[in-house]
């Protein structure tokens, strides 16, 4: 499928040649920007019948504690790479609110909530999980790549009933030195224990995206953004 690329200060957008009937909002990782995952879209080889718009937001620039306070694009501050470390609740919630704004924009453009998939890699995946599970309308799905569930202890009280059955694809590298696969597995187990339908994929790779993963992502999107699902509700 061919796409028309445009950019605003807030995001990079790939627009399909046909009128979009579905959308993937894809959040980048720490220190990257919205351009990071643009090259992957052609590799997905999605059929034109899906007519998916891809939106790649830019995170704000902020100091990151774990990187000696260096300013970079980040969805929230990271104090330490440890599951027990204090989390930047304010930053996480602010970025989840930004994600809500992007979803609202797609809804205003005529995309059904069930036609919207929230995707993210690493830190972006954490915001994808946090925000989408709290979103009040049933979404099309969540793709959480090489990431973890932030503020897991708050999910039970804050989760939206509408997304209790939202399909979740979690992918992780078994040799990930940044976010060890055990962090992903723990988050998967927490979500499954809470009743969420999680599809888990692990790959012999580090903190990256592989060709095998791209093929799995394409198949998953093809299933969950099929025209009959994307235009429902």
Image (cartoon, rainbow, N blue to C red):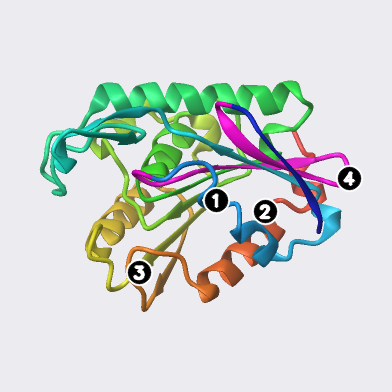
Quarter-of-image position of residue 200: bottom left
Given residues 4 and 41, the one toward you in this image is 4
Given residues 159 and 179, the one toward you in this image is 179
Q: Residue furthest bottom?
A: 204
Point out the stretch of residues depicted in magenta.
9-31
Tags 2 and 1 touching, CB below 8 Å: yes
Q: CA distance from mark 2 to mark 4?
A: 19 Å
The residue at which mark 3 appears reads as 173
Q: Mark 2: which secondary structure?
A: helix
* Label 1 Cα crowd, 10 Å radius (few <14 / some 14-19 / many 20+): some
Pointer 4 or 1: first along the chain: 4
- Is residue 195 located in the magenta-colored stretch of the structure? no
Given residues 180 and 233, the one toward you in this image is 180
- Is residue 25 located in the magenta-colored stretch of the structure? yes
Q: Is 140 left, or right, of 45 in this rendering? A: left
Residue 122 position, x and y percent, is 36, 50
The residue at which mark 1 appears reads as 167
Pointer 2 or 4: first along the chain: 4
The residue at which mark 2 appears reads as 224
x 70%, y 40%: residue: 115
Given residues 186 and 69, the one toward you in this image is 69
The residue at which mark 4 appears reads as 18
């Amino acid at each position: 499928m061919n796409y028309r690329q445009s950019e605003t200060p807030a995001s990079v957008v790939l627009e399909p040649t046909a009128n979009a009937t579905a959308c993937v909002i894809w959040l980048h990782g720490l220190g990257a920007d919205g351009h990071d995952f643009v090259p992957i879209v052609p590799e997905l080889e999605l059929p034109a019948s899906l007519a998916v718009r891809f939106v790649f937001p830019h995170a704000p620039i902020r100091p990151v504690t774990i990187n000696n306070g260096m300013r970079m694009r980040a969805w929230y501050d990271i104090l330490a790479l440890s599951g027990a470390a204090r989390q930047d609740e304010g930053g996480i919630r602010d970025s989840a609110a930004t994600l809500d704004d992007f979803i609202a924009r797609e809804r205003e453009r005529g995309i059904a909530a069930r036609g919207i998939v929230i995707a993210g890699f690493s830190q972006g995946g954490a915001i994808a999980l946090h925000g989408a599970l709290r979103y009040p309308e049933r979404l099309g799905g969540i793709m959480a790549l090489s990431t973890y569930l932030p503020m897991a202890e708050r999910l039970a009280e804050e989760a939206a009933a509408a997304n209790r059955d939202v399909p979740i694809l979690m992918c992780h590298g078994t040799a990930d030195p940044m976010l060890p696969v055990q962090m992903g597995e723990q988050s998967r187990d927490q979500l499954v224990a809470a009743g969420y339908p999680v599809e888990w994929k692990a790959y012999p790779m580090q903190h990256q995206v592989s060709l095998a993963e791209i093929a799995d992502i394409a198949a998953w999107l093809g299933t969950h953004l099929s025209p009959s699902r994307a235009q429902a509700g």
